[in-house]
Image: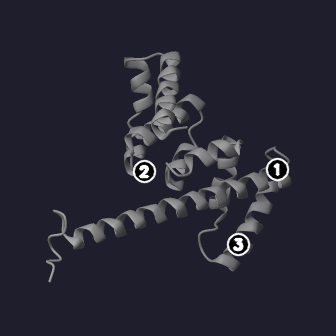
Amino acid sequence: MTDLNKTSGRSLFEDIRLLIEQSRANIAISVNAEITMVYWKIGQRIKTEVLNNKRAGYGEEIIINLSTNLTSHYGKGWSDKQIRHCLRFAEIFPDEKIVYAVRRQLSWTHLRNIIYIEDELKRMFYIEMCKIEKWSTRILQERINSMLYERTAISKKPEETIRKELELRANASKLTRGW
């Protein structure tokens, strides 16, 4: 009888454990990617069809009514605040291709923190740093709170250099992914 603990230098248990863990990680990434796209599509739909790409006072009532209906149908998680996050997400990232590209690399929680950063270059800095450094949402929030972007810009690089650095990192990551 074969010893199940010694198969090709690793235990059978360890090999199967790694398969299960990788599968769970892939499922979590896929689920997050779909949730992120749904939130963007909800925000985009509200932005284009209800608000006509403008901020409107009557939109607040529509968001509250939509929240009430969604909550009664799907349960908690559809507060008016959540719907405003979706709307903000679509406002900040109007191009679906951008959302599609980052949805598998950053969680909804990452993106929700980033969409409230007003400066576009600063937003892109934190997006790229999250992707490259694989920051958790807790680390991202700590870096934002510690003003990492501002400290980096002041102490080391002016705005144009940061922009070039982000482009280089983005191009380098495209090369390593093969696209």
Q: Name the residue under label 1.
A: 48
Lower sequence index among marks 1 and 2: 1
> Residue 141: x percent and y percent?
42, 45
Residue shown at 79% from the left, 45% from the top = 55
Residue 86 higher or lower than 175, as above or below = below
Lower sequence index among marks 3 and 1: 1
Q: Which of 49 and 56 is in front in this view?
A: 49
Contact (CB < 8 A) between labels 3 and 2? no
Report helix, strand or loop for mark 2: helix
Other residues around mark 3 within 10 Å, as few (<14) / some (14–19) / many (≥20): some
Q: Quadrant of residue 12?
A: bottom left
Q: Name the residue under label 2.
A: 137
Q: In which quarter of the image is the C terminus?
A: top right
Q: Can residue 40 be seen in this view?
A: yes
Q: Name the residue under label 3.
A: 70
Lower sequence index among marks 3 and 2: 3
Residue shown at 79% from the left, 61% from the top = 61
Q: Nearer the viewer, residue 35 or 73?
A: 35
C-alpha distance separating marks 1 and 2:
30 Å
> Residue 64: x percent and y percent?
73, 65
Under mark 1, the amino acid is Thr
C-alpha distance separating marks 3 and 2:
27 Å
Q: In this view, does 135 lie to the left or right of 95?
A: left
Other residues around mark 1 within 10 Å, as few (<14) / some (14–19) / many (≥20): few
Q: Can residue 119 be seen in this view?
A: no
Under mark 2, the amino acid is Thr
Q: Quadrant of residue 16?
A: bottom left
Residue 148 higher or lower than 11, as above or below = above
Residue 53 higher or lower than 148, as above or below = below
Residue shown at 42% from the left, 19% from the top = 154
Per the rendering, the mark at residue 1 is none
Q: In this view, does 76 lie to the left or right of 125?
A: right
